[in-house]
Image: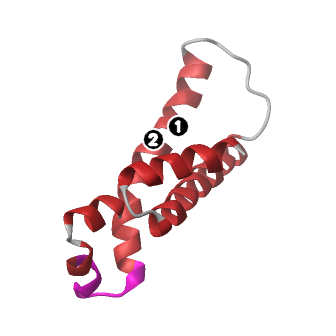
Amino acid sequence: MVKEREAGTIEQLLMSPGNDHRNHHRESHTDVCPAVLTAVLSVAVMKLAFGVPFHGKLPLVLAGAALCILSGISIGTVNATFAKSAQQAQLMAFSSILH
């Protein structure tokens, strides 16, 4: 969102057909899919390649990973909403993640 604000195309995004939920879904979908795929691959490599014993329920672990991913994307979206530039958004992300 910050890049689109800097490029001056945020108005086009806001005026496009559809409601805000579709626009937000379109923006966040590109972040969620690779992160979920990385979480699944990490668990598979941990189990198959390194032979780490896994005690527990796999769906519960993947649900926790999904919650962690979604919370990180939510923090980034809030930061992007208030930031005026990409550098400011990056600094806000550093401070909000570290605290």
Callout 2 secondary element: helix
Q: In this view, does 41 lie above or below 69?
A: above
Question: Which label is found at residue 40?
Answer: 1
Pick the residue in front: 74 or 79: 79
Residue 1, picture quadrant:
bottom left
Residue at x 74% of width, y 19% of height: 53
Residue placed farthest to the top in the image? 50
Q: Which amino acid does label 1 sit on?
A: Val
Q: Name the residue under label 2.
A: 37
Residue 69 is labelled as none
- 41 to the left or right of 6: right
Residue at x 20%, y 63% (from the top left corner):
7
Q: How crowded is mark 1: few (under 14 residues within 10 Å), some or many (20 or more)?
A: some
Tags 1 and 2 touching, CB below 8 Å: yes
User: Which one is in front, 49 or 32?
Assistant: 32
Residue 17: image location, x then y, percent: 23, 88
Q: Which amino acid does label 2 sit on?
A: Leu
Q: What stretch is highlighted in magenta?
A: 13-21
